[in-house]
Image (cartoon, grey):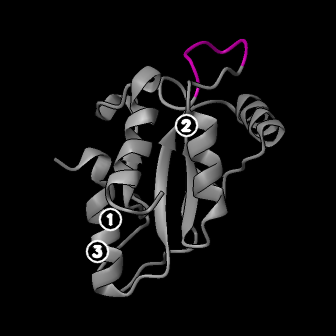
Amino acid sequence: MNPFNIERAFQDKAKRGWETLYVLIDAHGTLIKPGHDKVEFYPNAVEIMKWFNNRNDFKVILWTSSHQEEVTEIQRAAAKEGFFFDYINSNPAEQNSTRANFDKKFYFNILLEDKAGFVGETDWALVKQELTRIGEW
C-alpha cells in the first residue's frame, strides 16, 4: 500500500535525480474543516505542513476554489501557525517541455484532496505514519 503516493514520490525523486517534490493540498475538507466562516485546521495538519516547509526538497501548493478573500484568510491562519504555501493553484516552477504541457494541468507529485479520498480528521496522522515508515520523518 502506498498512501497518497508518498513512497513512490520519494522513490521517483531518488531514481530520477529530482531536486523537488510538489505536494498539492486541498483546502476545505483536507487541510481545514469545511465551512467558510473560519479557518480551523484538522488535527496533525499543522505539524505535517511545518514538516513540508522545513524540507528544502518540498514545495507546497494550496489547491482551492475559494475566493481570494478566503485564500488570504487561509494564508494568514497558516502564517499564524508557522507554515506557508509556496504557490496557490499553480506551479510556475515546472514549465512546458517537449514531453509535457502544463498549460491546463500543472505538475505535482503528491495529492492530498478529500475528493480523492483524503479524510482530514484522520489522514494527516497517516501521512506522518507513512513518512516515518519510509524513513523520511
Residue at the (77%, 37%) spot, across then down:
81
Q: Position of residue 77 (x, y in %)?
A: 78, 32
Give the spatial CA distance, label 1 vs label 3: 5 Å
Q: Which residue ends up furthest to the left in the rendered image?
A: 1
Q: Which amino acid does the dot numbered 3 rest on?
A: Asp
Q: Contact (CB < 8 A) between labels 1 and 3?
A: yes
Give 55 or 110, whichever is nearer the viewer.
55
Q: Residue at x 28, y 72 (%)?
A: 11
The magenta segment is: 32-38
Q: Amino acid at mark 2?
A: Thr
Residue name at image x 56 percent, y 24 percent: 42
Determine the residue positioned at 22% across, 50% down. Answer: 2
Q: Is residue 40 left or right of residue 18?
A: right
- Please name the residue that numbered disc 1 is placed on: 9
Cα–Cα span, label 1 and label 2: 22 Å
Q: What is the secondary structure assignment of the residue under circle 2?
A: loop
Pick the front one: 52 or 90: 52
Mark nearer the N terminus (2 vs 3) = 3
SS of the residue under disc 1:
helix
**Residue 50 picture location, percent across and down:** 65, 49
- Mark 1 packing: few (<14 Cα in 10 Å), some, or many (20+)? some
Q: Nearer the viewer, residue 2 or 69?
A: 2
Where is mark 2, residue-wise?
Answer: 64
Q: CA distance from mark 2 to mark 3?
A: 26 Å
Per the rendering, the mark at residue 35 is: none
Q: Which mark is residue 12?
A: 3
